Image (cartoon, rainbow, N blue to C red):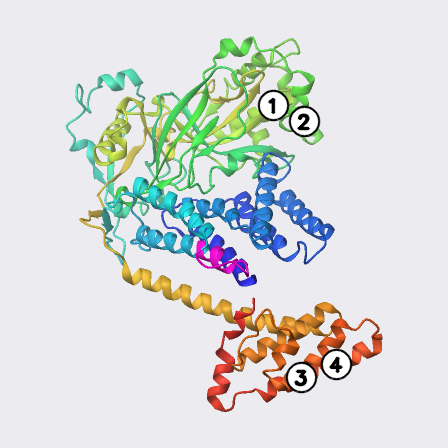
């Protein structure tokens, strides 16, 4: 039974660990998922197996279950939306294990078998049509075989290891259980995994010494847009409103990244590099990669890691993620957004409703990552904001954390003094927000993105230098907003806007669209080329009935001086070359499968030997207790040691005395065993004496059956015959 339980646990952990090592899944498990899949579910299964009746009392079982559940829920999920998920998972893990190993109700294994099978099917379907790094070729084929082997192994473990003692072989229940699992998996394989799901192999160009970046001026070679040209203005350019004409350069994909060090910092070095291609009908589209809500009196705004909006940025997904918290905001439009990215972390518009898994495709390097998502984007305007009502007392209490502003007295006095010149108590919340933004009309906007968000830096920007980038504007706005009684937070990410799309950006988009299949499905007029110059920081205000709204904090600032706008610098895009070679037929990676099978074989035997010797050591420690459990441990240890010497296994129906009829050396052990187990008037001293004698008898009996010679010693060390005692 213990072996069956541990095998079941091993197969479950193997399935859940595949996404962590899979080369096509880009983003790691978050802390919530790690705790759920690798701690809570295994620990609750272990508590059901080792600490449940009849081994333990119902009170002990409840205390262990509640203790594991409470500790992991508090430290890993917190008290919020994740609490119910943790509770449901814990109850399911405990209940399924108890039903299987105590009631031997094998039907309880069907849901978990289907769940494990669905993981492999989703992984295989997820990897269709994608390319992988050097460790990736054959991963889909391996998953196909590994999935079938793991699910069937799990099924056989349940069917045979949990067989009832008097149940005949070939039970109808076993065949029904087999059909209930295998038939849906076969149907899923037929429907979701067509024979040609692997259509390529990967070819790599190994460069030992990277060449110098080779920029190719594309605008000198191109023939221009339909209906326009690079020297003039196309109809599309006129509709979207351009702001300058930098040069357009191409960099070979295999050199991408080598020339960007000089361009880091949004324009330093004279070039801006492509980061994203975004398809969105909303202009502009703010794409967030971090929400900063915590406020420190010295360091300023900091990121709250437990915020679900921050977790989803780097959370590993195998299926569609859906936002569990959907506020009833007005004036939001559900918008389909597609992001093709050179960076692994997601950037998503607010309010994200759902997100598809990130797909990895090296054939279009460096635009290796892609993912669609749906966001409910606010479509309000200043006319809506001016008529907004004030917060109710309950709303203000719920949003209190976004109003906290623990400044020291000197800083608070300076900020509040500045604020009193802009707003008064008669203004609505919307009027206050607009007044704060309009107050920057004498501050110079220098495009860039700084990391210093300290309160001291914001004071210097507001009162002394009066010039800064989006970081200074957004963080200062958030401070003033909270002092004005408006819930605020700072958001970082990228800005996709037609106002930032020059002719070179548009020409770059057209070039990329011609070479990247996934972009050919998107209308050009909805595409934005987002570069390092478009790294941005902005403020979100929470307004009653409308929720969190993105505000452009630099809207009223003095525009950048000539030469101070990185967006007017040369645009660099990668020259995409297909790195895949189409395959013609499915080829089974026998070597990879053989290596995996050998590894599993060695791991399984290592586990079995560890279990064998660990159990013998555990039983020896329990003998000295002198109670019924110690007595049973002595019997089990003797049987295991005899099995190691080649003695036949004792049948379950045999008593020690009946077994000793075949092995005379066991007679004294059986006599002492019967006295300790069945005599009711035995004294404590006599029990202690007999227990010591029983322990000595174990070594004596085993010595009489010890196999001689080197061969006997090797058989004794490596035999696993004792595993026949469950």
C-beta proximity under 8 Å, tags 2 and 3: no
At mark 4, the secondary structure is helix
The residue under label 2 is 412
Give the alpha-carbon distance from disc 3 to disc 1, as whole Å: 83 Å
At mark 3, the secondary structure is helix
C-beta proximity under 8 Å, tags 1 and 2: no
Does the magenta-highlighted stretch encompass residue 161?
yes
Q: Alpha-carbon neighbours of circle 1 within 10 Å: few (<14), some, or many (≥20)?
A: many
x and y percent of residue 115 in the render? 46, 44
Q: Earlier in the sequence, mark 1 or mark 2?
A: 2
C-beta proximity under 8 Å, tags 4 and 2: no
x and y percent of residue 643 in the render? 54, 78
Give the alpha-carbon distance from disc 4 to disc 1, as whole Å: 74 Å
The residue under label 1 is 487
Q: Quadrant of the C terminus?
A: bottom right
Does the magenta-highlighted stretch encompass residue 518?
no
Q: Which residues are magenta?
A: 155-170
Q: Earlier in the sequence, mark 3 or mark 1?
A: 1
């Amino acid at each position: 039974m213990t072996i069956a339980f541990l095998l079941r646990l091993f197969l479950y952990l193997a399935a859940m660990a595949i996404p962590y090592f899979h080369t096509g899944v880009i983003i790691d498990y978050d802390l919530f998922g790690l705790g759920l899949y690798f701690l809570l579910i295994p620990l609750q299964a272990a508590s059901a197996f080792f600490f449940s009746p009849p081994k333990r009392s119902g009170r002990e079982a409840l205390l262990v279950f509640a203790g594991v559940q409470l500790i992991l829920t508090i430290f890993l999920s917190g008290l919020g939306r994740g609490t119910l998920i943790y509770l449901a998972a814990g109850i399911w893990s405990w209940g399924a294990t108890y039903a299987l190993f105590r009631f031997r109700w094998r039907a309880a294994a069907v849901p978990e078998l289907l769940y494990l099978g669905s993981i492999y099917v989703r992984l295989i379907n997820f990897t269709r049509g994608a390319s992988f790094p050097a460790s990736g070729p054959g991963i889909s084929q391996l998953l196909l075989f590994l999935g079938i082997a793991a699910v069937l192994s799990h099924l056989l473990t349940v069917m045979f290891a949990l067989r009832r003692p008097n149940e005949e072989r070939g039970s109808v229940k076993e065949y029904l259980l087999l059909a209930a699992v295998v038939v849906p998996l076969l149907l899923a394989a037929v429907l979701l995994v067509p024979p040609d799901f692997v259509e390529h192999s990967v070819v790599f160009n190994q460069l030992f010494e990277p060449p110098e970046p080779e920029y190719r001026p594309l605008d000198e070679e191109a023939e221009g847009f339909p209906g326009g040209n690079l020297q003039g203005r196309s109809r599309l350019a006129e509709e979207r409103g351009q702001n300058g004409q930098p040069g357009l350069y191409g960099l070979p994909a295999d050199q991408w990244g080598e020339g960007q060090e000089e361009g880091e910092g949004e324009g330093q070095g004279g070039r801006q590099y492509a980061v994203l291609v975004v398809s969105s009908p909303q202009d502009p589209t703010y794409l967030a990669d971090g929400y900063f809500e915590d406020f420190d009196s010295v360091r300023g705004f900091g990121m709250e890691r437990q915020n679900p909006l921050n977790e989803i940025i780097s959370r590993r997904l195998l299926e569609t993620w859906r936002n569990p918290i959907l506020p009833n905001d007005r004036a939001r439009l559900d918008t389909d957004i597609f992001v093709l990215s050179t960076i692994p972390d997601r950037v998503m518009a607010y309010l994200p409703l759902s997100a598809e898994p990130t797909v990895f495709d090296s054939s279009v390097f460096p635009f290796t990552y892609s993912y669609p998502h749906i966001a409910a984007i606010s479509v309000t305007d200043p006319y809506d904001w001016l008529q907004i009502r004030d917060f109710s007392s309950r709303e203000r209490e719920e949003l209190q954390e976004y109003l906290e502003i623990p400044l020291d007295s000197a800083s608070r006095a300076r900020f509040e003094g500045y604020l009193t010149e802009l707003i008064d108590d008669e203004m609505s919340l919307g009027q206050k927000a607009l007044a704060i933004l309009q107050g920057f009309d004498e501050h110079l906007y220098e495009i860039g993105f700084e990391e210093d968000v300290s309160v001291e830096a914001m004071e210097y920007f507001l009162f002394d230098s009066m010039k800064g980038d989006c970081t200074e504007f957004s963080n200062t706005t958030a401070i003033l907003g909270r002092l004005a009684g408006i819930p605020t937070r700072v958001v970082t990410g990228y800005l996709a806007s037609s106002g930032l799309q020059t002719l070179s950006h548009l020409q770059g988009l057209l070039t990329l669209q011609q070479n990247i299949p996934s972009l050919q499905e998107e209308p050009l007029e909805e595409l934005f080329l987002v570069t390092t110059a478009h790294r941005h920081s902005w403020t979100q205000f929470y307004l009653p009935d409308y929720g969190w709204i993105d505000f452009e904090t630099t809207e009223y600032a003095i525009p950048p001086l000539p030469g101070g706008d990185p967006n007017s610098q040369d645009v660099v895009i990668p020259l995409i070359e297909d790195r895949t070679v189409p395959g013609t037929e499915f080829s089974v990676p026998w070597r990879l499968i053989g290596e995996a099978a050998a590894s599993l074989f060695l791991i399984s035997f290592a586990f079995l030997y560890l279990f064998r010797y660990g159990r013998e050591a555990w039983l020896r420690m329990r003998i000295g207790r002198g109670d019924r459990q110690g007595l049973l441990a002595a019997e089990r240890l003797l049987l295991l040691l005899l099995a190691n010497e080649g003695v036949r296994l004792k049948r379950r129906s045999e008593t020690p005395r009946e077994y000793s009829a075949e092995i005379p050396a066991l007679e004294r052990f059986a006599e002492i065993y019967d006295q300790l187990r069945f005599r009711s008037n035995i004294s404590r001293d006599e029990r202690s004496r007999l227990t010591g004698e029983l322990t000595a008898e174990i070594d004596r009996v085993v010595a009489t059956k010890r196999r001689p010679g080197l061969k006997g010693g090797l058989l004794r060390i490596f035999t696993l015959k004792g595993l026949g005692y469950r």
